[in-house]
Image (spheres, rainbow, N blue to C red):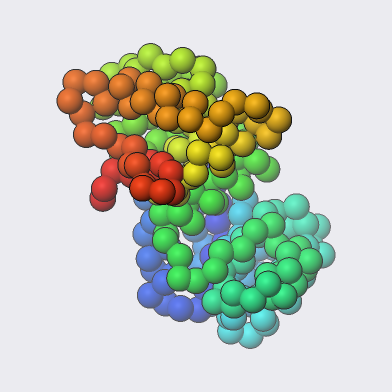
Amino acid sequence: MARAKMLLVEDDAALAELLIWHFKREDFEIAQTPDGEEALLLAKENTPDIVLLDWMVEGLSGIEVCRRLRRMPETANVPIIMLTARGEEEDRVRGLETGADDYVTKPFSPRELVARVGAVLRRVRPALAGEQLTYSDIEMDTVGHKVRRSGEVIPLGPTEFRLLKHFLEHPGWVFSRERLLDAVWGHDSDIESRTVDVHIRRLRKAINRGDRPDIIRTVRSAGYALDSGA
């Protein structure tokens, strides 16, 4: 699998260091700068596969960097995720209208940001995102339709496979039954929400066999999440 190249534009040194650590662990190749002008030069010299861009950076504003990246032929189609402390809807809309593909409001979980970046890359750069999804000791080959836990093959039915795939794409996120129905069964499904519970039980039985720790967390009155408890 090709290493994904990321351009991180962030002037908070501690946050930049934290994000670099998390993304290097996922085998990303990272160029980082706190400066908007330098970001444009780096992007032109070595076109990234994805850009993480803070709204407030040194030199040019994040919005202006985003606008110029969209005008440059090298980066016109590179996905851009904006990092912002601004939670107001107007600011989010402005970022998206300028050309950002997604936004994440601070404070955020680095693990969730890694998942969000992975989801964007799967959508726009499937070859880069690869065929493997991993979390804790679970590995999924999305093309070969195989799942392993601690190296042991886990047989899953088609619905349980899609359910686990959705969880692996969004580790730590809590999904209600209704959202899981939409994501796994489709918007037009007339299946009852309690059906989700049945498939969650089947999935748990398959991946937790042999007294392995239960990696699917039930969140009372909210839904389910893939969570190792780490």
Measured as percent of width and height from the top left, residue 177 is found at 50, 38
Q: In the image, what residue occupies the spot 41% across and 41% down?
A: 224
Q: Is residue 92 left or right of residue 158?
A: right
Q: Outermost residue, bottom direction? A: 59
Q: Residue at x 49, y 26 (%)?
A: 195
Left of 16 or right of it: where is 4? right
Q: Is residue 107 above or below residue 7?
A: below
Which residue appears at 48% of the width and 30% of the height?
194
- Is 90 located above or below residue 216 in the figure? below
Please say whether residue 128 is visible from this viewpoint: no
Where, by quadrant of the figure, is residue 125 drawn?
top right
From this viewpoint, is residue 121 visible?
yes
User: Residue 173, image x and y in percent?
Assistant: 45, 49
- Compared to residue 53, the image places residue 184 above or below, namely above
Left or right of 19? Residue 6 is right
- Quadrant in the picture for residue 205: top left
Q: Is residue 69 left or right of residue 107?
A: right
Between 120 and 230, the residue placed more toward the observer is 230
Instruction: Tell me if residue 200 comes above or below residue 101 in the rendering.
Output: above
Residues 135 and 174: in front is 174
Task: Looking at the picture, tell me which residue is in the foreground, 167 or 115.
Answer: 167
Query: Residue at the spot x=24%, y=21% of the render?
Result: 209
What is the count of numbered marks? 0
**Which residue, as the protein is rendered here, is positioned at the far left?**
211
The x and y percentages for residue 168 are 45, 37
